[in-house]
Amino acid sequence: QQPVQSPQAVILREGEDAVINCSSSKALYSVHWYRQKHGDAPVFLMILLKGGEQKGHDKISASFNEKKQQSSLYLTASQLSYSGTYFCGTETLSNTGNQFYFGTGTSLTVIP
Amino acid sequence: NAGVMQNPRHLVRRRGQEARLRCSPMKGHSHVYWYRQLPEEGLKFMVYLQKENIIDESGMPKERFSAEFPKEGPSILRIQQVVRGDSAAYFCASSLLAGTGANVLTFGAGSRLTVL
């Protein structure tokens, strides 16, 4: 039930781009992306609801392919502040409620 | 409007003792999720609760662990007879609605349990 993320870790120089992938074996209702720094509380980045939806703010965007049950997070022209661990969260619906499972995380380090 | 409040932030227990972790969801949120995170690892789902109901506890160990979310007061994650392997950060998250697709989870700062 836990989604699979790749890569596990990536190191970038400022200004470089990165893509983080997330896939699930279950039918998804939505995909969420969070960022966690230094073991603090994960912070919400964005939610994607519909198949094929793309969203973004600033230079961070994401896409969601509902049919393939996959999502990708795109970080362009990376900044030092982008460093952290990125988690995708998958939401599935059941009769009893919504279930959220998180991927294993992708550690992103941006260096000057 | 306070966010998700977790306490204690840090808890040290000796093997065999009990640990109680508390989570007060955001105001108006009636759905609570607990996750465990080991160092350098992901967020592992433990349990999903609504007020007075356990909706999904498939991620929680069958023994020693229990959770509740009473009508009044915070949600509590209880670990009895703790062992060293229970040492981890325990995060609580809350959400407002179910089934709408706009179910953003807001996380607390976590409770870090160390078992000596």
Image (tube, rainbow, N blue to C red):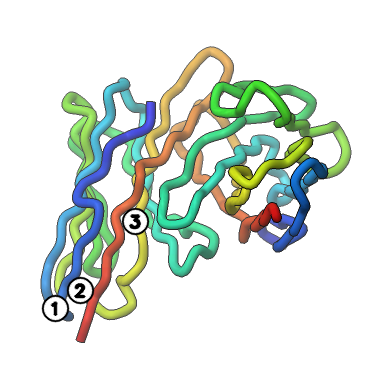
> Where does the image place residue A101, in percent across and percent down from the top left?
44, 35
User: Which chain is mark 3 on?
Assistant: A
Relative to B28, does residue B13 appear above or below in the rendering?
Answer: below
Mark positioned earlier in the residue sequence (2 or 3): 2
Q: Circle 1 sits in a helix, a strand or a loop, which is it?
A: loop
Labels 1 and 2 positioned on one and the same chain: yes
Give the residue at mark 1: A15
Give the residue at mark 2: A78
Give the residue at mark 3: A86
Mark positioned earlier in the residue sequence (1 or 2): 1
- 10 Å crowding of disc 1: few (<14), some (14-19), many (20+): some
Residue at image position (42%, 47%) is B42
Q: Is residue A20 left or right of residue B55?
A: left
Q: Nearer the viewer's eye, disc 3 or disc 1?
A: 3
**Residue at the right extreme?**
B72
Q: Is residue A86 left or right of residue B8?
A: left
Amino acid found under the numbered disc labelled 1: Gly
Relative to A15, does residue B115 appear above or below in the rendering?
Answer: above
Residue A40's disc is none
Residues under numbered marks 1 and 2 in contact, where contact means CB atoms less than 8 Å apart:
yes
Residue at image position (70%, 29%) is B50
Relative to B32, does residue A35 appear above or below in the rendering?
Answer: below
Labels 2 and 3 positioned on one and the same chain: yes
Q: Is residue A39 left or right of residue A56?
A: right
Mark positioned earlier in the residue sequence (3 or 1): 1
- 10 Å crowding of disc 3: few (<14), some (14-19), many (20+): many
Q: Residue B85 sits in which quadrant? A: top right
Q: CA distance from mark 3 to mark 1?
A: 18 Å
Amino acid found under the numbered disc labelled 3: Tyr
